[in-house]
Image: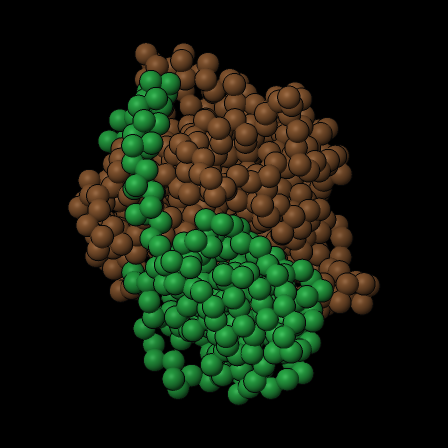
Chain colours: A brown, B green
Amino acid sequence: MAGKTLYDKLWDQHLVRQNEDGSSLIYIDRQILHEVTSPQAFEGLRLAGRQPWRIDANLATPDHNVPTTARSGGVDEIVDPVSRIQVKTLDQNCDDFDIVEFKMNDTRQGIVHVVGPEQGMTLPGTTVVCGDSHTSTHGAFGALAHGIGTSEVEHVLATQCLIAKKMKNMLVRVDGELGAGVTAKDVVLHIIGVIGTAGGTGYAIEFGGSAMRSITMEGRMTICNMAIEAGARVGLVAVDEATIDYFKGRPFSPSEAQWDAAVAAWRELVSDDDAQFDKVVEIKAEDIIPQVTWGTSPEMVVDVKSTVPDPDKEADPVKADGIRRALSYMGLSANQKITDIALDRVFIGSCTNSRIEDMRAAAAVVKGRKVADNVKQALVVPGSGLVKAQAEEEGLDKIFIEAGLEWREPGCSMCLAMNPDKLGNGEHCASTSNRNFEGRQGFGGRTHLVSPAMAAAAAVTGHFVDVRELVAE
Amino acid sequence: MKKFTSHTGITAPLDRANVDTDMIIPKQFLKSIKRSGFGPNLFDELRYMDEGQPDQDCSGRPLNPDFVLNQARYQGASIMLARENFGCGSSREHAPWALDDFGIRCVIAPSFADIFYNNCFKNGLLPIVLDEAQVDQLFKEVEAEQGYQLTVDLERQVVVTPSGTEFAFDVDAFRKHCLLNGLDDIGLTLQQADDIKAYETRRRQEAPWLFDAIK
Ligand code: SF4
């Protein structure tokens, strides 16, 4: 019999019951809650007179709606009344049901996908869910993690289980060595460019190969974060020494007495050598250079040294039509150079790129430089209060402020513009987030997805530039 | 949950691939803490010429005449036809809530994003996958004939065109059963509470560090 993939192992370990009709019941170890997708779940629980099955499997923090400007006044001072009610509702629900919550001004508050791993809530071998599609992030640690809808949030609260169907296995193997200045973000954008936004639909994608082993835990999170942009609910990376080291001393990590047993179990979390994947995609690390998206879907991505595609050269009429529509929305013309795209705003943050290494990478580029005159605003939004504190300890905040960038409080911010941070109609933004859909960062806003170093380079030059040239200068 | 057995209705063609959930219901409407009332803001940015705000009365807003749901011939549509990868992007269940609130009971496309597909079933909405050629044919027929109606029969798992042509579709046995009977799946899972408890007992022995840590 063929060996098992990492995904097979995680699935088997969590199978509560296999039903005759083909559905399965799987056990959920961890659920993270935020203010946007949980209120209707709590309401459902109340209406049915149900209690949470297991309180200690849940952790909550508000992130999508919170303002990122000075907010010492607390929840009461959130200006938008609708946002305020939503954050207050989360606070109230967590208080009522006794769920641990990092409230808005707790230093541990932040974006759910930054906070979970940072606290050791996410651990190798766990199943992790959240009412948010970027829950795939947590797969970086060898956890089976995926986004769910609000009905399922309620289902997990009430039963600690999900009714699920096993996915297929895909391996994306990135072999070789990444060039200097090429980051995890470029790797994942490149992968999405290759397999397409629906390429991973129905699959759990394991990211493997020699290049993955050399990418840090934070970089692996960036890659798994965007598995959903390739259509896969689940992204995974096998456990290695870096994974184990990451969890030493985290607040919810196993205690000293349990540590050795936990590590022994974690070391099993790799795909067997003879495991069978339904699909294998091979990527050469040497082929990857800094990436920039030009369109309104993450698969509309090219090398920074390249040009905007020409719909007349596309044979498939549905695709050609998609390119035309995207060019018109983005205000770009076919065959235009990527480096000729001027920026109005820059956003460094989001659950894709708001951890300490991202802050360091951006700071290294802007250090001693100034934000270009045509850039109206360049925001740096750390992913959690703890990332913010760490960055300030390292003096990164000063580097940003001196260069003319704004240093903010943690939250989702301009990633989806549910709080006041947004793009104006027609504005171009170099953004380290994960979605460039129409209107995502504000009505009529034009998003270009890039790495933190590339966003920083765009901030100081006012247009896209290959960051490797800028730093080598 | 609402039952779905068989449904006949006006079919509206949304001729685009990769329709994402941000497009189906933009983020500003996600601030609601309710499950209902999203219908007037379904496809808000495509449907109206101005930027919509939560809790706004939409009746006086300028409509985009090019958008399919605004065209006279598709008024009252309850079946939507779309291209590949429908419902990609965010996990927001507000997307099926908005479709449902607007009156859409069924979406037919060559493929759906996983989370959206799953969310539909939780809300009595039926997503149907047909192959590209069949979807293409339906697009042509819908556009050629005013008042074009499809019938979707879940029991028999077929889409029936006005000329009587039938297209068979697949659906999981469990999901079909829940939709046909309007079953609440939390209630169903709780019937298996003994299995869940047995699993937990075993898990607590194997991985004790996963219990009582978050408090
Ligand atoms: S940072 Fe953006 S993608 Fe991530 S959870 Fe927040 S809104 Fe979603």
Task: Using the rendered view, name the quadrant where residue A332 is placed.
Answer: bottom right
Q: Is residue A469 left or right of residue B41?
A: right
Q: Is residue B131 left or right of residue A109?
A: right
Q: Is residue B70 above or below residue A253?
A: below
Task: Using the rendered view, name the quadrant where residue A6 is placed.
Answer: top right
Q: Quadrant of the C terminus of chain A?
A: top right
Q: Is residue A211 above or below residue B25?
A: above
What residue is rendered at 45% in x and 26% in y?
Answer: A13
- Judging depth in this view, the residue of A155 and B69 nearest the camera is A155
> Where is residue A372 drawn, in percent x and y?
58, 56
Task: Using the rendered view, name the quadrant where residue A124 is placed.
Answer: top left
What residue is rendered at 32% in x and 12% in y?
Answer: A257
Q: Is residue A94 above or below residue B134?
A: above
Q: Quadrant of the N terminus of chain A?
A: top right
> Where is residue A460 drawn, in percent x and y?
59, 51
**Residue A157 visible, this orientation:** yes
Q: Is residue B80 left or right of residue A173?
A: left
What residue is rendered at 69% in x and 69% in y?
Answer: B136
> Where is residue B72 drawn, in percent x and y?
53, 87
